[in-house]
Image (tube, rainbow, N blue to C red):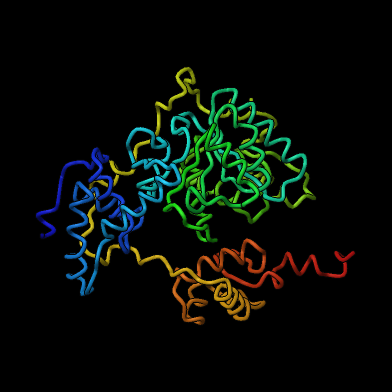
Amino acid sequence: MTEEANSSTHPPLPPTTEDTRISWLRLLRSRRVGAVTFHRLLAKYGSAQNALSALPEMARAAGIKGYETCSVDAALAEIKAAEAAHARLLCFDEAGYPPYLTALRDAPPILWAVGDIARLTQPTIAIVGARNASSLGVRMARALARDLGEAGYCVISGLARGIDTAAHMAALRTGTCAVMAGGVDVIYPAENTRLAGDIAEQGVMISEHAPGLSPRSRHFPARNRIIAGAAQAVVVVEGAAKSGSLITARDALDLGRDVLAVPGHPFDARSAGCNMLIRDGAQLVRNAQDVIDALPPVDLTDRMVQDAPTNVLQRQASKTVTSIADLPPPPPEQRSLQETAVLHQRILDQLGPSPTAEDQLIRDLAVTSRDLSPALTDLEMSGAVTREAGGLLLRGDFSDASCAKDSPKHRR
């Protein structure tokens, strides 16, 4: 079947039958098809089945032999695993899908959900923060989540230790949503297994990944973009200068969402990120009313979102995919812990006191950008690697901040 025969000028529609839902799942799980590519293909061909038919021909035209799309059996196996986990499939732009999330360019085409999906269509506010939260931070997160929930908002977070856990627990009665970094049935950290069970009964848990998938480091930034995208605003309670909470805040800012932060003591590193956000213009938060006052008025009488942003399918309708070369490369193969440690050490060995450009590091190590990026994220988050102005990299123990800290004047 040729590309021309599959092309469609009709706007893509959400699936209405089991067969079309399976086609959506097959397209998304096919090699070289991620969220962005999925939306582009659907806008081009009008349906997932048409896109599936076109992909092998596109691959052959690009000289790629033996390209195969995800099989029906593989899609059915994922659905069976989801049924065992009591998970429901939510497809993009259909009833129950988080309305604010549709504005993301890389909005998940499908979500697996466990629990009360009606929570996803409430006005939603994200509360995120440090895993090693202080006692005051935990108390603040609980108070914000409780009061925002009573005001009619669903509290969304990432089920991590610390601030996330406190926010979920305080909002159980009024409605909370946990976004999972792995499969919706894989609880991480394991200590939150009981909390996850409570959320499944009283709130909702969602994931873009197949059930059974264990979370890896590269999944957490992707999880954070869902938290930011599904919420009307993001409140950061505690967060270091280089933390996942700041990634979530940056994603929210990129989407034009409101970002608010709770101030902290300048000497507490856990509050450095919040204080930076406030310095750069984020709304200072003392209580839930500060959050509510900072947001545009929302009609909470029916607890439904009425003013969600324009969705990505409408924006993609005019864009086309003409070659397999337009598709992003497949995700990197999962590395073992030993392989990851070796790559981390190679990066650290290559870096020194002189800043190095990331593309130079790629050439020196003879690795791909997709292999290097997750490893750099891990090292930056731990402070082992510092990113200077202009994106230049150097080892953390050679950074200006580290040198100042280690100088005799700053030693205890």
Classify the position of the N terminus by image quarter. bottom left
Residue 33 lies, in percent from the top left, at 32, 59
Is 117 left, or right, of 75 in this rendering? Answer: right
Query: Does 253 appear above or below 396?
Result: above
Residue drawn at 36 percent across, 49 percent down:
80
**x and y, in percent, of residue 317 in the image:** 24, 45
Q: Nearer the viewer, residue 286 or 175?
A: 175
Instruction: State the residue lying farthest toward the front.
Output: 84
- Residue at the image point whose x is 67% and y is 64% from the top: 383
- Quick one: which residue is furthest to the top in this view? 301
Number of numbered labels in the structure image: 0
Image quadrant in which you'd find residue 117: top left
The quadrant where residue 369 appears: bottom left
* Residue in the foreground of this view, choosing between 165 and 137: 165
In the visual, does 83 lie left or right of 176? Answer: left
| As drawn, 352 above or below 182 | below
Q: Does residue 20 appear anywhere in the picture? A: yes
**At 39% across and 48% down in the image, what residue appears?**
108
Question: Quick check: 347 left or right of 297?
Answer: right
- The answer to whether any part of residue 282 appears in the image is no
Viewport quadrant of the C terminus: bottom right
Q: What x and y, as percent, mark residue 181?
A: 51, 52
**Residue 346 location, quadrant:** bottom right
From this view, report whether residue 146 is shown above or below residue 12. Answer: above
Q: x%, y% of residue 29? A: 33, 57
